[in-house]
Amino acid sequence: SFATVGDPATAKNNLAIGAGENAREAYNEYDGTTYGDEQAKRAENLVFFSSRGPTADGRFKPDVVCPGDDIRSACSDGSLDTNQCGSQVENYYDGKDRPEGVVLGMSGTSMATPLCAGAAALVRQYFREGFFVSGDKSADPAADGHNPSSALVKAMMIQSGEPLHFQDSMDGGYQLPPRMPHLSQGFGRVNLENVLWFADSDFAMVFKDRVEIAPAGSDLHCFTIDDDAPADRPFRVTLVWTDPTGTPGT
């Protein structure tokens, strides 16, 4: 249901993550069930348990979504000495005792968040290694690379978002948001192919980072769009800033 997102996801400067469903191939393999043409169990869906906005003060949260349903992960025995890892797959919710070294299938925004964290790390690597200069890794990252601010990383993640089908209720039909961002999913599922520009990309990417604007000031940027620009690549702008630290408890 809506207005279910809670702290710390409601913080202003963080990147709050919602959970999407997994790829159809993963469900067929993990569950041993063959899914057909039904809309359920697809990577293009928001999973039903993912918390939704708005926040108490009306902001969109979560910010973006990554897969978080039936994700396989290692089951730790809590020891730093065993370094266990195995191939046996167990279901976290079946109540069984765990043999050593099992791999669990788990679901939740806690499984989606590491995937989005990995995507954010790739965004950071993209800038640090200077890919944005020519579309390939720079031969001299120390000279060409850029140390991205947290606001720039957040902006790139948001800019990459794609809308997901969602349900108004557990037994309701799937629908696409009428517009984005949407209270169910923020800016949608992260897809870095939409935002990281490489030599063979069919779009252009321009970024500005750590631009300081004086109170009541402005910062103007002009862009020219060719008449023959592809219609499926609309002009999009994402603005992210880092708010000053607030008073705890407010």
Image (cartoon, helix red, strand yellow):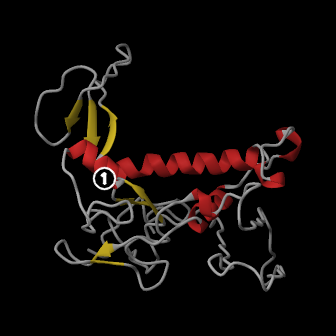
Looking at the image, residue 183 lies above or below residue 227: above
The spot of residue 189 in percent (x, y) is 47, 63
Q: Residues within 10 Å of mark 1 (few under 14, many from 20)?
A: many
Q: What residue occupies the far left of the structure in this picture?
A: 95
Left or right, 154 with respect to 211, comes to left
SS category of the residue bearing label 1: loop
Looking at the image, residue 99 lies above or below residue 126: above
Q: Nearer the viewer, residue 10 or 60?
A: 60
Residue receiving disc 1? 69
Residue at position x 74%, y 66% from top? 205
Q: What residue occupies the far top of the structure in this picture?
A: 81
Residue at position x 83%, y 53% from top? 133
Q: Nearer the viewer, residue 1 or 190?
A: 190
Report whether residue 29 is seen: yes
Residue at position x 68%, y 60% from top? 152
Classify residue 75 by image quadrant. top left
The spot of residue 207 in percent (x, y) is 76, 65
Task: Give the residue type that dot 1 points to.
Answer: Asp
Left or right, 17 with respect to 3, comes to right
